[in-house]
Image (tube, coloured by chain):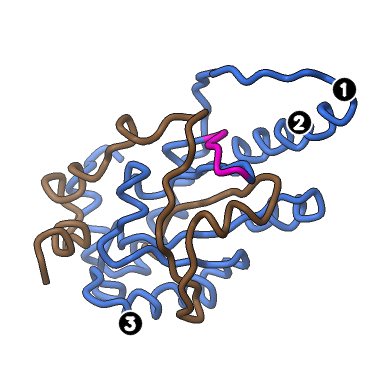
Chain colours: A blue, B brown
């Protein structure tokens, strides 16, 4: 996702990471109880996990996150007007890049004189589950996070 | 800490605590206007989601956390 932000910045595409709540709280990164702690965790996201996009924080009660369905790692794309043009209940870089490649053509097509009208489309995309990497991240959160996930999803 | 803060910032990944927040089906639809909301920059200055999306032709917003 960082690479997409870098690769499309010159085409007037913005990208941010919006910090929500701890999906898998553990001993090292427990559930949030203050904004001070939330800022600290967000700085670690930048410094430890190398998120290079601007990181913005939601309110402690998740006002923004809850308004958009509060999935743990979803991605939305907004047009400059605020129009919602893409929503995905999970973040997948291939899916996002595919959408961005489509949307970056819209201003060009309009400038070329095409009369465009919006329509809705539903599509089922597929992502790599990257299980090994995911379990490593759970261990980084703390043993509790890994144990709780295994208990919630024994076949996961 | 009030109830919504406690429930939203759940202390354990157990179904009865995380499942109530999986509400994607009830989220705003594509083609509708985004809901504006107050946010914070990492330097602790306030901003809004509308300030973010108004800066570029399109803006990608990934929601998530360290964990």
Q: Nearer the viewer, residue A111 or A4?
A: A111
Q: Nearer the viewer, residue A59 or A124?
A: A59
Question: Residue A131 has which mark?
Answer: none
Instruction: Report the Cα–Cα distance between label 2 and label 3.
Output: 41 Å
Say which residue label 1 marks.
A113
Say which residue label 3 marks.
A36
Q: Quadrant of residue B24?
A: top left
A41 with respect to A9 (left or right)? left
* Horizontal and vertical percent position of residue A51: 57, 66
A26 with respect to A15 (left or right)? left
Label 1: which secondary element: loop
A91 with respect to A66 (left or right)? right
* Horizontal and vertical percent position of residue B40: 44, 70
Tell me the chain of label 2: A
What residue is at 24 percent from the left and 51 percent from the top?
Answer: A149
Position of residue B21 relative to residue A33, above or below, is: above
Quick check: marks 1 and 3 in contact, CB under 8 Å? no
The mark nearer the N terminus, 2 or 3, is: 3
Position of residue A24 relative to residue A8, above or below, is: below
Give the magenta range.
Answer: A81-86
Split into 4 quadrants, where in the image is the N terminus of chain B? bottom left
Say which residue label 2 marks.
A106
10 Å crowding of disc 1: few (<14), some (14-19), many (20+):
few
* Horizontal and vertical percent position of residue A41: 39, 75
């Amino acid at each position: 996702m960082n690479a997409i932000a870098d690769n499309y910045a010159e085409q007037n595409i913005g990208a941010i990471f919006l910090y929500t709540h701890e999906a898998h709280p553990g001993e090292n990164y427990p559930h949030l109880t203050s904004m001070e702690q939330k800022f600290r965790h967000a700085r670690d996201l930048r410094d430890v996990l190398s998120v290079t996009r601007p990181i913005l924080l939601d309110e402690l009660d998740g006002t923004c996150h809850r308004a958009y369905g509060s999935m743990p790692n979803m991605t939305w794309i907004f047009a400059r007007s605020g129009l919602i043009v893409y929503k995905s209940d999970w973040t997948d870089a291939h899916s996002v890049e595919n959408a961005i490649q489509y949307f970056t053509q819209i201003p060009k097509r309009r400038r070329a004189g095409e009369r465009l009208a919006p329509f809705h489309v539903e599509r089922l995309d597929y992502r790599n589950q990257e299980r090994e990497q995911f379990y490593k991240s759970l261990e980084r959160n703390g043993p509790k996070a890994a144990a709780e996930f295994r208990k919630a999803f024994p076949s996961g | 800490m009030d109830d919504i803060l406690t429930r939203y910032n759940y202390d354990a990944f157990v179904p009865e605590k995380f499942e109530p927040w999986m509400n994607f089906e009830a989220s705003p639809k594509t083609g509708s206007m985004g809901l504006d909301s107050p946010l914070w920059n990492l330097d602790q200055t306030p901003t809004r989601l509308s300030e973010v999306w108004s800066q570029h032709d399109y803006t990608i917003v990934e929601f998530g956390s360290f964990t």
